Amino acid sequence: MRPRSTPDLLIPSGPGAGDPGDLETTLMKWSCKHMFALAAVLTTLVFSGCTSDLTCESGWCGTAVVASAPVQSLFPPNPQLDVDLGVYDLVFSKLADVGPDFNTIGDDGFVNGLASSWVFEDELTISVALNPLAKWHDGTPVTAQDVVFTYSIYQNPVVNSIARSRLTAIASVTARDSLTAVFRFRRFYPEQFYDAVSHVHILPSHLLEGVPPEDLRTHEFALHPIGSGPYRVVRWTPGELVELAGDSTHFLGRPGIPRVIWRAVGGPTAGVDEVIANRADFLHQVGEPTDLERIAAAPHLRLIEYPSNTYNYVGFNLRDPEDTTQAHPLFGNRAIRRAIVMCVNRPALMQSVMGGRALLLVGPVTPASAIWSEDLADALPFDSASARNILSDLGWFDSNGDGVLDRNGRQLEFDLLVPPVAMRARGALVLQEQLGRSGIQMNIVDVEWAAFFDMLGRGAFDAQYSSLGQDASPASLATDWTEDGFGEINAGRYSDPEYTKLVREARDGTDRTQSLNKWHAALKVINEDAPAIWLYIPKKFAAVHERFDDLVLSPYQPWIGLSKLRVEPSHFIERDLYGAN
């Protein structure tokens, strides 16, 4: 399950960004054993901690300050940014989740959440037994009725959860008894268990039953949620911070540190500034080459590289922006799309934008996917001469000598939507220059996030510079780039019968070798169809404060490891004592 936004939407600005707000005031109450003057305290407590020994009287101390985008939603069915999912993973529980090998076939390697065990009763039925110790943060036991209620919410078209398309094969969810939920499927397929347990954060029915579905997003619960995860929400100041406190009696054991605080910052470089200045402890993605160098030079920080599940692309709109029932006047033509792709020197663009810290993209698949292969062919490599011949055969010539190809009075011209991400802004300039050499005029349209999402949702664009994160299953290829993704990820409304047939057969196949062959065959089809210019896969680096023990990062859920963070007492800084006594 992925939000409509993308992982390198990373850090849009928000009101109060970079302001520690009440946290700084609160931290002033916590002093070092040897007190500095008040002016020094104001600086030291928040920014770097004291240099003298610190004592954790409660025996459970540690605070992680996360620099991130401002959290947009605390209602799990409707995340707006990836950071929202990061909070959900700590505040709410799933039934189970994929393990460290990211297997999604059958149930091998899955890690228990609310589920203590499960049984495949037949090929269409899975029963899940809940952990009897699991409780909501208000002390109410978690029951099978909560599971039944939650799936009714996630599957409700009025709620319109982004996970709904992944739950269509689930025919029903019922409660056999207070601690047993039963899933029945419409058909058999290998990822039944994955779809049943991994896309949904369970909600408390005792607090939400009776609330009209259309009111759930604005209900009091969405501002002050009650979950069953290892952390509870203490405070949410929209646009500024979310403070979480660890549940010391959690049914799976208390988390490693008692406090996690998300602080909004004003952009990727502002996030880097925060961790370098020791005002934050964790930044899940550092992309700019200069920022990576700054992090590497900071003695109190570590850079952690982890597998990338994110790819950047320029997606074409195959429908007319003014009448989505009609083909786009340019991109509805497969040959034109292919020619435009061939005019782009993608290795040069990648080098210019990413400075070598990326892999060339040859289709909508990343190294974090089980179907990734370094042998995947680049169907349309850079060949501007052949591209010009294709366009000439289609009747595109520079008839008036202005440097732009035209046909029947129309120039070969289109607009590219670019959201406020520095790397995409640089990439758009390179792309504009490269296409211009071949007589293609691309106009850069810079838009804020709200406008970007609005225009994609309405289909009111020619092309868009996007980034997309994949989940653990290659089945995302069956939703992101088929009719299933219309109105969601597949904003350009690409649809090809052969591609759709192959990905659905691959998704439903029981023979892994045959399925892999079909996934690769599908990638060949979509690459040759050119619904997008496949650009690059940014390598992923996170910045973490060196006082924390080793942190293992998932490419799909980079924040989930925060519950495992620990700080040795000898490494405490002042903010680790925040709220400890």
Image (cartoon, rainbow, N blue to C red):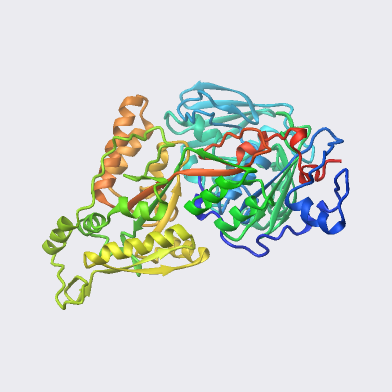
Is 356 on the left or on the right of 170, as rendered? left
Residue 4 can be seen in this image: no
Q: Residue at x 55, y 27 (%)?
A: 110
Asked if residue 443 is positioned above or below residue 278 in the image, the reply reads below
| Whole-percent x, y for residue 320 in the image | 32, 65
| Whole-percent x, y for residue 566 in the image | 70, 34
Is 366 on the left or on the right of 329, as rendered? right
| Whole-percent x, y for residue 116 in the image | 64, 24
Residue 424 falls in image quadrant: bottom left
Q: In terms of depth relative to the viewer, which is nearer, 453 or 201?
A: 453
Q: Residue at x 44, y 65 (%)?
A: 455
Quarter of the picture containing the C terminus is: top right
Residue 273 can be seen in this image: yes
Q: Residue furthest left?
A: 393
Q: In terms of depth relative to the viewer, which is nearer, 218 or 155?
A: 218
Q: How many numbered circles are shown? A: 0
Asked if residue 578 is positioned above or below residue 505 in the image, the reply reads below
Q: Residue furthest bottom?
A: 400
| Whole-percent x, y for residue 55 in the image | 84, 37
Residue 93 falls in image quadrant: top right
Q: In terms of depth relative to the viewer, which is nearer, 264 or 74?
A: 264
Asked if residue 168 is positioned above or below residue 353 in the image, the reply reads above
